[in-house]
Image: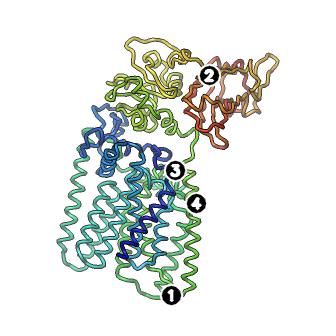
C-alpha cells in the first residue's frame, strides 16, 4: 500500500511537471525542427482513421512515395512501409474515441509514455539501492536533455520506444537479481515492442541476448526457456520485417530503410564533426557532460578503495559495454543521418547514457554526512543549471525566420480543409501540390490525398502535370516564383478555381490560355484595402531623388526606400495578398532584394523576400492573420550587394 501511494505521488509529480513544461505546445501542429518526420507519423494516424483501422496497411496522404525514387512514381493509394505502427494505430483509436483529429491527442499519448519511462527509471535506480534523491536526479538527467524534452510531447516513436527499453531494463534487473523467469518474459516483451516500433532499438534486445549467451558459455549449460523466448521474439521481428519489405516492394515508403554509411574515414570524421557542431548542446547540457567524467572519477576512486563491486552492478556494466559497442556499430552504419537528425541520439546513445547513470548513481555511496550534504548541494545546483540551459535550448529550437519554409506552408494551408469545402471540392478529390516543403503537411491541412512535387524544376513539374489528379494546389507567393523562374509556361496551362489569399486551387486546362501572374491569381478582380506609392505619400523613408527625379539608392546604403505602416487592422482578420510594382532601371543587379515583413515588438511574424530584377516587375507576398493588434509592416529594398540602384516607380496594393 505504501509503495502504491509513493508511485502514485510520483506519477502526479511527473505529470504536473510535464504539464508545466508542455502546456503551451500540446495542441500545436508538427512544426519547427523535423516537422517533416513528425508530420509523417501524424499522417499515419489519420490514415488509419480513413482506412477503417486496417493495422496491416498503414497509409499516409502522399501517393508518390519518397522511396525508392524520390517521389517519381504515382501510386493508387498512400499505403507505405513503416515500422510496426502500434503507436500511430493507438492514437487513431483515441482519435476515434474523442471524435477529434487534433494534435493534442497524439502529443498527449507520447507524453504519457515519457512519464511511464520516467517512473520506471526512478524505480530502477531505487531497485539498485539508490536513494530517492539519486533516483530523482537520474530522472532529471533524462528529462533535461534538450533533445529529449523537445520530442517527449511530439509525434516520433522514439520516445515510446525509449520508455519501453527503460521499462524492459527494470524487469531485466528483477530477473538478474531473482533468477525468476516471469520478469524476464516481461522484459523481453518490452524490448521486442521497442524494436518493432523503432528499428535501432534492436540494439538493446540483441545486447540482452548476447549477455544471456555469455552466461550459457560460462555455465556450459543451455537455458532452453530463455532461448525459446528469444527465438519467439526474433521470429516476430523478422516476420514483420519480411511483411514490411513486402509493403515496400508493392507501395514504396515514406521512411528510410537502408544504411547511410560514410565512404571513407575522412568523410566519417567530417560527418561526426558536423553532427557535434549542430547538436552537441542539444543532445545534453554542459552539466550532463560534466556529470560523466566527475562521477566516473569518483566511482573509480571508490572501487580502488573498496576493491569490490556487487554482482548486479557487474552484470549491468557488462550490459553497458555490449550496448555501447552495438550503438557505435549502428551509428557508423547510419552516420549520415546524425548530421541533420538529432533524434537519432535518442535512438542510440541516450540508452547507454541512461545505463551509465543508473550504474554510477547506485554504485557511488558516501559514508560521511558532509560528503552526502555536498553531493546534495551539487545535485540541486546542477539540476537548476540544466533546467535553465534546456529551457533556453527549447527557445532556440523553436526560433523561426524566412528560412523556415515549413512554417510558411503550415500558415498558408491552415484551415485549408474548410476552403476546399467552400469550393465544393469533394473529400475524394486527388490533389497535385506543387510546393510542399514537408510532403504530408499540406495534405493533412487540406485533408485530401494526392501527389507531392517536392523538388521544383520544370521537368519535374511537367512530368507530374500528366498524372491522374483532379486539382493543382500551390501557395500564392510560390506561384510567382514557379512561373517567373522555374516553369514560365505553367500559367497558361492552369486556371484558378479559388483560394484563401495564401494558397490557390487550380484546374488544368486542355487548351492553353496566356495570362499574367495578376490574371492567374485574379488579383485585379479584387478591390485593395490599402494602396500607396512613392509619388503620393510622404510615409516613405530613405527616399532620395537624383537630378532626373529618379529614386537613388547609393552603394553605401544597405537598406533603402522603406515603407512602414502600423496596426493595419485588415491584416488581423484575413490572409492578405500584397502586390508590389517596382520599376528598376539598373541592369545586372547581383544581390538586391525586396523585403516584406511584419513584426510584433521584437518578434518577426512574417518575413518574405524576393530577388529584384531590372525593368517593370510585379512582386507577390502573402500573409496570415496577425494576432497582435500592435504590429509594424515593413516594405523595403535590401541592397545586400552594396550597389547603386535607380528606381523609377514603387507602388503597393494590399488585397
Q: Which mark is residue 477?
A: none
Q: CA distance from mark 3 to mark 4?
A: 19 Å
Query: From the viewer's perspective, is the residue at label 2 or at label 4 nearer?
Result: 2
Residue 588 in the image: state x and y as whole percent. 65, 24
Q: Find disc 4 in the rendering and name its residue.
A: 389
Quarter containing the C terminus: top right
Q: Is residue 352 depicted above or below 420 in this figure? A: below
Left or right for 643, reference 257: right
Do the CB atoms of the residues marked 3 and 1 lie less than 8 Å apart? no
| Kind of element beneath mark 1 | loop
> Does residue 269 appear anywhere in the picture?
no
Q: Which mark is residue 367?
A: 1
Q: CA distance from mark 2 to mark 4?
A: 46 Å
Query: From the viewer's perspective, is the residue at label 1 or at label 2 nearer?
Result: 2
| Kind of element beneath mark 3 | loop
Q: Find disc 2 in the rendering and name its residue.
A: 529
Q: Quadrant of residue 226?
A: bottom left
Amino acid at each position: 500500500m505504501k509503495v502504491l501511494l509513493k508511485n502514485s505521488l510520483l506519477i502526479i509529480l511527473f505529470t504536473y511537471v510535464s504539464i508545466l513544461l508542455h502546456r503551451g505546445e500540446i495542441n500545436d501542429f508538427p512544426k519547427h525542427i523535423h516537422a517533416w518526420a513528425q508530420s509523417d507519423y501524424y499522417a499515419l494516424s489519420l490514415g488509419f482513421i480513413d482506412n477503417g483501422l486496417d493495422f496491416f496497411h498503414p497509409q499516409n496522404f502522399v501517393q508518390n512515395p519518397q522511396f525508392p525514387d524520390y517521389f517519381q512514381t504515382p501510386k493508387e493509394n498512400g499505403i507505405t512501409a513503416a515500422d510496426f505502427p502500434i503507436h500511430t494505430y493507438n492514437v487513431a483509436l483515441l482519435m476515434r474515441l474523442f471524435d477529434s483529429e487534433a494534435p493534442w491527442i497524439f502529443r498527449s499519448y507520447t507524453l504519457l509514455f515519457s512519464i511511464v519511462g520516467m517512473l520506471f527509471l526512478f524505480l530502477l535506480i531505487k531497485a539498485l539501492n539508490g536513494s530517492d534523491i539519486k533516483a530523482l536526479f537520474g530522472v532529471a538527467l533524462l528529462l533535461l536533455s534538450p533533445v529529449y524534452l523537445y520530442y517527449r510531447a511530439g509525434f516520433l516513436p522514439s520516445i515510446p520506444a525509449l520508455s519501453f527499453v527503460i521499462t524492459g531494463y527494470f524487469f531485466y534487473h528483477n530477473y538478474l537479481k531473482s533468477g525468476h523467469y516471469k520478469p524476464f518474459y516481461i522484459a523481453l516483451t518490452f524490448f521486442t515492442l521497442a524494436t518493432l516500433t523503432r528499428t535501432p532499438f534492436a540494439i538493446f534486445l540483441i545486447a540482452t541476448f548476447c549477455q544471456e549467451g555469455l552466461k550459457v558459455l560460462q555455465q556450459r549449460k543451455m537455458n532452453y526457456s530463455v532461448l525459446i523466448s528469444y527465438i519467439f521474439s526474433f521470429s516476430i521481428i523478422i516476420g514483420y520485417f519480411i511483411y514490411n519489405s513486402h509493403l515496400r516492394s508493392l507501395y514504396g515508403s515514406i521512411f528510410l530503410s537502408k544504411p547511410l554509411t560514410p565512404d571513407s574515414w575522412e568523410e566519417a570524421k567530417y560527418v561526426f564533426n558536423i553532427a557535434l557542431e549542430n547538436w552537441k548542446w542539444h543532445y545534453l547540457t554542459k552539466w550532463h557532460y560534466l556529470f560523466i567524467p566527475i562521477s566516473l572519477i569518483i566511482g573509480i576512486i571508490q572501487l580502488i578503495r573498496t576493491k569490490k563491486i556487487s554482482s548486479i552492478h557487474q552484470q549491468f556494466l557488462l550490459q553497458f559495454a555490449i550496448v555501447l559497442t552495438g550503438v557505435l556499430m549502428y551509428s557508423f552504419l547510419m552516420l549520415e543521418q546524425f548530421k541533420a537528425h538529432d533524434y537519432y541520439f535518442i535512438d542510440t546513445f541516450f540508452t547507454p547514457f541512461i545505463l551509465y547513470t543508473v550504474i554510477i548513481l547506485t554504485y557511488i555511496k558516501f559514508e560521511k554526512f558532509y560528503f552526502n550534504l555536498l553531493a546534495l548541494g551539487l545535485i540541486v545546483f546542477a539540476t537548476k543549471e540544466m533546467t535553465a540551459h534546456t529551457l533556453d535550448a527549447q527557445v532556440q529550437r523553436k526560433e523561426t525566420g524566412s528560412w523556415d519554409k515549413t512554417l510558411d506552408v503550415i500558415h498558408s494551408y491552415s484551415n485549408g480543409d474548410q476552403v476546399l469545402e467552400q469550393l465544393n471540392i469533394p473529400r475524394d478529390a486527388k490533389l497535385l501540390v506543387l510546393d510542399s516543403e514537408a510532403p504530408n503537411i499540406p495534405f493533412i491541412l487540406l485533408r485530401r490525398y494526392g501527389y507531392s512535387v517536392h523538388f521544383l524544376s520544370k521537368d519535374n513539374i511537367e512530368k507530374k502535370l500528366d498524372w491522374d489528379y483532379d486539382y493543382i494546389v500551390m501557395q500564392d507567393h510560390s506561384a510567382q516564383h514557379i512561373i517567373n523562374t522555374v516553369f514560365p509556361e505553367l500559367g497558361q496551362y492552369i486556371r484558378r478555381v479559388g483560394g484563401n489569399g495564401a494558397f490557390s486551387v487550380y484546374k488544368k486546362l486542355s487548351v492553353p490560355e496566356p495570362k499574367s501572374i495578376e490574371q492567374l491569381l485574379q488579383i485585379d478582380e479584387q478591390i485593395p484595402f490599402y494602396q500607396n506609392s512613392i509619388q503620393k505619400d510622404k510615409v516613405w523613408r530613405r527616399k532620395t531623388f537624383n537630378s532626373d527625379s529618379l529614386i537613388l539608392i547609393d552603394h553605401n546604403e544597405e537598406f533603402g526606400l522603406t515603407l512602414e505602416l502600423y496596426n493595419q487592422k485588415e491584416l488581423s482578420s484575413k490572409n492578405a495578398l500584397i502586390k508590389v510594382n517596382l520599376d528598376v532601371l539598373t541592369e545586372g543587379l547581383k544581390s538586391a532584394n525586396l523585403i516584406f515583413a511584419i513584426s510584433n515588438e521584437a518578434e518577426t511574424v512574417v518575413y518574405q523576400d524576393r530577388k529584384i530584377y531590372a525593368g517593370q516587375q510585379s512582386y507577390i507576398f502573402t500573409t496570415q492573420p496577425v494576432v497582435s493588434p500592435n504590429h509594424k509592416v515593413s516594405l523595403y529594398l535590401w541592397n545586400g550587394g552594396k550597389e547603386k540602384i535607380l528606381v523609377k516607380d514603387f507602388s503597393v496594393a494590399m488585397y
